[in-house]
Amino acid sequence: EAITVQELAKRMGERGADLVKALFKMGTPVTITETIDQDTAELLITEFGHRINRVSESDVDIQAETDVDAEDTLKVRPPVVTIMGHVDHGKTSLLDAIRGASVVSGEAGGITQHMGAYQVSLPDKSKVTFLDTPGHEAFTEMRARGANVTDIVVLVVAADDGLKPQTIEAINHTKAAGVPMIVAINKIDKPDAKPQKVREELLQHEIIVEDMGGDVQDVEVSALKKTNLDKLLEAITLQAEILELKANPDRAAEGAVVEAKLDKGRGPLATVLIQRGTLRVGDVIVVGAASGKVRAMIDDHGRQVKEAGPSFPVEVLGLGAVPSAGDQLTVVENEARAREVAAYRQGVLDKKRTTSAPVSLENMFADRASTTIEFPLVIKADVQGSVEAIVSAVNKISTDEIRVRVLQSGVGAITESDVTLAASTGAPIIGFNVRPNAKAREAAQRNKVEFRYYDVIYHLTDWVRGAMAGELGPEI
Ligand code: GDP
């Protein structure tokens, strides 16, 4: 899992000397013939504005800008939506109601087996993909594995019950992911429904709905009476338009596993959400540490399909083993290569299992109960790739005594809502190639929130490291 600086430079198409210089600044003084570990390599690659394609150890495909699909290859893709909220607030009912409505509106096939994700067609023929794994555990689990598949979160809050612990958890998870949210105020058919109270409670968590002058869409619905489902779908479509969700369908497929199981008759089954490219029957694939050849694909209506494009969920048959949710699917040239990559990933997995516990809700609660000090941060950057690189880099700085907690991260200028969120916890706001807008600056002055601006990741991480050390006080 180590690579020489020389080799890395060659693959990146950069001068070795420039890499050595950058490494020196990162506090890793090495010569060109020495090796660096994968984490350092990744940081460096991101630093130089390249994209990493973690395919295998022997071939960490580092593709320069070329691996980012050219603008003119991008086509609009359906949004991928996850529904979250407190237990019994109606997540399942809402999913069923939306799906039922869509089926009734003339789609062939009808509801079939549960497969973890499905698509609904809207009257204008556009589509929305729902992940049928409600709950922030699945959401966080997937994210922990690097699969950021959700474009939009629908937060369900029962109007007769208001914000509950899991609602607040869901809000935090969504914020941490930098995913936009739509609030579905459910059960408005109930006589004791108090939708306005829900809006007010949301304010305390810096969720300002449109009705209250903010920019978070809210829709009053009843999953039971099927009221305003069309309005909720409209809100999703609108949010999707704002996000300008696009992907290149004309390339080898990449996707993420949403759910997987072993079927007695058919062997390992994985529901995969295609993220870019098109997956076809016959493609040789690696999914996590499993490999195989796509024998058949089944859509959410139980129909066999020959190909699946971006945002399309399909059940894939033909894998040699059962992968895990969040695993990445990659198409490779041939089966020998597939086995090689799968074996490498298995090695990485075994190592991870022994070194770190998986992220689960229980762990998170346990963490909170312990005496670890938290160092909160809000991070904004100019592009999503930087956001992810920074969040991952700062998270790595955490120690047993003090851990980084990214309250919010996202793409774009620093806004007033970033400031309110930061002010509530005394967090500084880091802008990577972005600045605050006027309102945010005013709010920061009022609330004494600190801004830090960077354009080089390791300068940023250096500062965080220093600030965290300051927080802990002198070494005992
Ligand atoms: P989940 O735990 O969030 O998935 O919640 P469920 O969908 O299982 O719903 C919990 C309970 O609330 C069930 O008894 C539903 O019938 C009921 N419920 C869900 N939506 C509505 C609604 O819009 N109105 C009313 N009155 N009850 C609802």
Image (cartoon, rainbow, N blue to C red):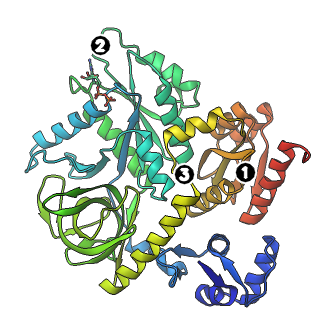
For the point 45% across and 17% down, the residue is 196
**Mark 2 or mark 1: which is in front?**
1
Q: Distance between the residues labelled 1 and 3?
A: 15 Å
- Which quarter of the picture shows residue 424? top right
Q: In this view, does 2 lie to the left or right of 231?
A: right
Say whether marks 1 and 3 touch (CB < 8 Å). Answer: no
Amino acid type assigned to the residue bearing label 2 in the image:
Lys
Disc 1 target residue: 399
Residue 305 location in percent, x, y? 15, 65
Disc 3 target residue: 357
Amino acid type assigned to the residue bearing label 3 in the image:
Ala
Disc 2 target residue: 190
**Mark 1 or mark 3: which is in front?**
3
Question: Which quarter of the rendered image does ligand 1 occupy?
Answer: top left
Residue 287 location in percent, x, y? 35, 68
Q: Earlier in the sequence, mark 3 or mark 2?
A: 2
Q: Which of marks 1 and 3 is nearer the N terminus?
A: 3
Does residue 66 lie above or below 79 as drawn? below
Residue 248 appears in the figure: no
- Which quarter of the picture shows residue 31? bottom right
Q: Which of marks 2 and 1 is nearer the N terminus?
A: 2
- Which of the image's four quarters has the C terminus? top right
Residue 106 location in percent, x, y? 9, 45
Neighbour class for label 1 at 10 Å: few (<14), some, many (≥20)? few
Residue 212 location in percent, x, y? 52, 25
For the point 30% across and 60% down, the residue is 272
